[in-house]
Amino acid sequence: MGGEPHADSALVRPKWPDMRIQHLVHETDDFIVAIDPELDLDWETTDEYDATGPKEPLRHNEILNLAASLECIPNDHQKRSVRINFKRMIGEGIARSLKHDYDNAQRILDDALSYIKVRNVESARSWQIMTGFVAATVLGVAALTMWTLRVELSLLWGHTAFLFVFAALPGGLGAVLSMLFRIGHSFPSSEAPCRLHVLEAVSRVLAGCLSGVAVAAAIKAGVVLSVLRDKPGTSALIISSLAAGVSERWVPSLLVHLHKSSIEGPKGRDDTQ
């Protein structure tokens, strides 16, 4: 048990000289359960207790195995208070098992699992929401800038190219809206690293941008909303791109429809010849 305490100095109990105690969980004449300065659980029993052993060795070992598994759940990213609460609940489960109260030991370990799962879901949601807010800010600023310079950019890039690039922005904003609408009904876990959640959120925004471009191209080609083909710069195009970003099924359905049309078209012509 090497290392230095993170906050206050570790306590030392004369009866348990090998224990470095940052937070005492439970202590009796027969055993002690504590959290060390690295916020790891530690426990120790007397020789007299070991000579007698647990009343139900099988259940006791199951409790210890579950406690060890719970400690392996990633929680380093959580606040110190959350980590201490989590470790104390696990420690209480070990202490109850050492007192031969196996039913209550199982209950509090189940509570510890539920507690850390909820905290990890909250962390994962916060990572995704923050990424969405940053992406929405960037896309919003880009959209305002492009709209302000629309005349100059249209002359520089060409009107069609400008519309395609501009359509990507509401598509990305639509993807952010979709994330925010569904965040309360999804249960991501921060057991996966933060960078993975950020990458997932960014990939959804990128997919929304591409969906906006795809819908703009489909409108320009007259595949959908052909009434807008001659006036693709209208607000309806922006709304369509936004809807494409929100809906994860619209563009895939459109691509499937185009694929089927490309296959059935030649067959139809062959049948008429």
Image: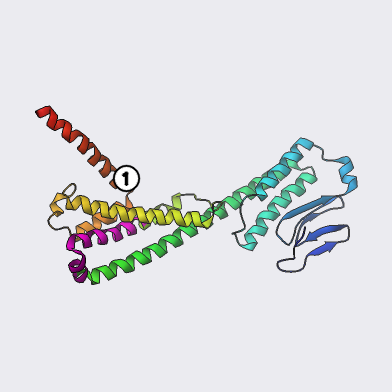
Image position, residue 268 (x, y; %): 14, 31
Amino acid marked by disc 1: Arg
Residue 8 relative to residue 146: left or right: right
Is residue 160 rendered magenta in the image? yes
Classify 226 as above or below 19: above
Q: In this view of the protein, which residue sits in the foreground, 120 or 223? A: 223
Is residue 76 shown to the viewer in this render?
yes
Q: Residues within 10 Å of mark 1 (few under 14, many from 20)?
A: few
Classify 227 as above or below 157: above
Seen at 66% across and 45% down, the residue is 69
Is residue 135 rendered magenta in the image? no
Q: Quickly name the residue at label 1.
A: 249
Seen at 18% across and 63% down, the residue is 158
Q: In this view of the protein, which residue sits in the foreground, 263 or 190? A: 263
Residue 32 relative to residue 82: left or right: right
Q: Quadrant of residue 54?
A: top right
Is residue 104 shown to the viewer in this render?
no
Q: Looking at the rendering, in which quadrant would you find the C terminus?
A: top left
Magenta stretch, residue numbers:
151-175
Q: In this view of the protein, which residue sits in the foreground, 44 or 212? A: 212
Image position, residue 11 (x, y; %): 80, 64
Q: Quadrant of residue 101?
A: top right
Seen at 53% across and 51% down, the residue is 189
Type of secondary structure dominating the magenta stretch: helix
User: Tag 1, which secondary structure?
Assistant: loop
